[in-house]
Image: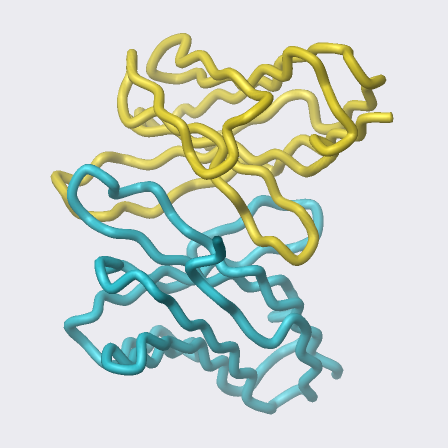
Chain colours: A yellow, B cyan
């Protein structure tokens, strides 16, 4: 059981390049999330998808777009990468629990450097 | 705006000691308070969580203490072990349609010396 799988694990980009971070979960979870982790700032929510077919902005959505491709997959796209987007990106998923909070399960992250 | 403030940023404890990490929140609508543990190179994993209708929750060596009036909650790790060395994040969330949108603290790097 793989859980949440993120690809790639590492990536170096030049300013202005674009790329898509991939995330897939095999736990049949309804909700999926993208976070970025920066030193001293914890994890900040970029976008989330409460269920297949829906997406919504989180705390820091500027410069990013997302696609909920199906129930399993949720991708994050940087259209024109900037050095400020250098970070570790985490994808997570959780089961929707009828108004109650359910644990979020995280992937191992994508380490992205933008030069 | 950081709605959940966590301290200390780093903590060094001797094996067998007690590790204490504190968090304070501002949003009184928060009603779910999880703690996540993260090892280097890995994603965070849920450690323990509490709701504000109880003042304490214990799971093994890990205890959450919650003070609703002070809007504070803390993680206590008893008999700390070198294997507990990790980064710990507190978080908070509201219920209803916002569930799942966690607000995280800044993180605490815990080092337990043998």
**Residue farthest toward the left in the current orientation of the protein:** A98
The answer to whether residue A115 is left or right of residue A86 is right
Residue B2 position within the rendered picture, expressed as x and y whole percent measured from the top left: 48, 57
* Quarter occupied by residue B4: bottom left
Split into 4 quadrants, where in the image is the C terminus of chain A?
top right
Residue depicted at 56% across the width and 20% down the height: A64
Split into 4 quadrants, where in the image is the N terminus of chain A?
top left
Residue A100 position (above or below residue A3) = below
Residue depicted at 21% across the width and 70% down the height: B52
The number of numbered discs placed on residues in the rendered structure image is 0
Residue A72 position within the rendered picture, expressed as x and y whole percent measured from the top left: 39, 17
Residue B71 position (above or below residue A18) = below
Q: Please state which of residues B13 and A57 is positioned toward the viewer in this rendering.
A: A57
Q: Please state which of residues A40 and A28 is positioned toward the viewer in this rendering.
A: A40
Residue B107 position (above or below residue B74) = above
Residue depicted at 45% across the width and 72% down the height: B23
Residue A89 position within the rendered picture, expressed as x and y whole percent measured from the top left: 61, 34
The answer to whether residue A77 is left or right of residue A3 is right
Q: Please state which of residues B73 and A8 is positioned toward the viewer in this rendering.
A: B73
Residue depicted at 27% across the width and 46% down the height: A102
């Amino acid at each position: 059981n793989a859980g949440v799988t993120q690809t790639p694990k590492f990536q170096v980009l030049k300013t202005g390049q674009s790329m898509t971070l991939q995330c897939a979960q095999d736990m049949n979870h309804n909700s999926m999330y993208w976070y970025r982790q920066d030193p001293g700032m914890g994890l900040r929510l970029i976008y989330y998808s409460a269920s297949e077919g829906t997406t919504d902005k989180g705390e820091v959505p500027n410069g990013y777009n997302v696609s909920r491709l199906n129930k399993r997959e949720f991708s994050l796209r940087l259209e024109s990468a900037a050095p400020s987007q250098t970070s570790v990106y985490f994808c997570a998923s959780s089961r929707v629990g009828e108004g109650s909070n359910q644990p979020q399960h995280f992937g191992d992250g994508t380490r992205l450097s933008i030069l | 705006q950081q709605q959940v403030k966590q301290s200390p940023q780093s903590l060094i404890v001797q094996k067998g000691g007690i590790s204490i990490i504190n968090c304070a929140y501002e949003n009184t609508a928060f009603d779910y308070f999880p703690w996540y543990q993260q090892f280097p190179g890995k994603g965070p994993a849920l450690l323990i969580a509490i709701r504000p209708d109880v003042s304490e929750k214990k799971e093994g060596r890990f205890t959450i203490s919650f003070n609703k009036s002070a809007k504070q909650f803390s993680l206590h790790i008893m008999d700390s072990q070198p294997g507990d060395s990790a980064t710990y994040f507190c978080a908070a969330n509201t219920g209803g349609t916002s569930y799942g949108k966690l607000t995280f603290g800044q993180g605490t790097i815990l080092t337990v010396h043998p």
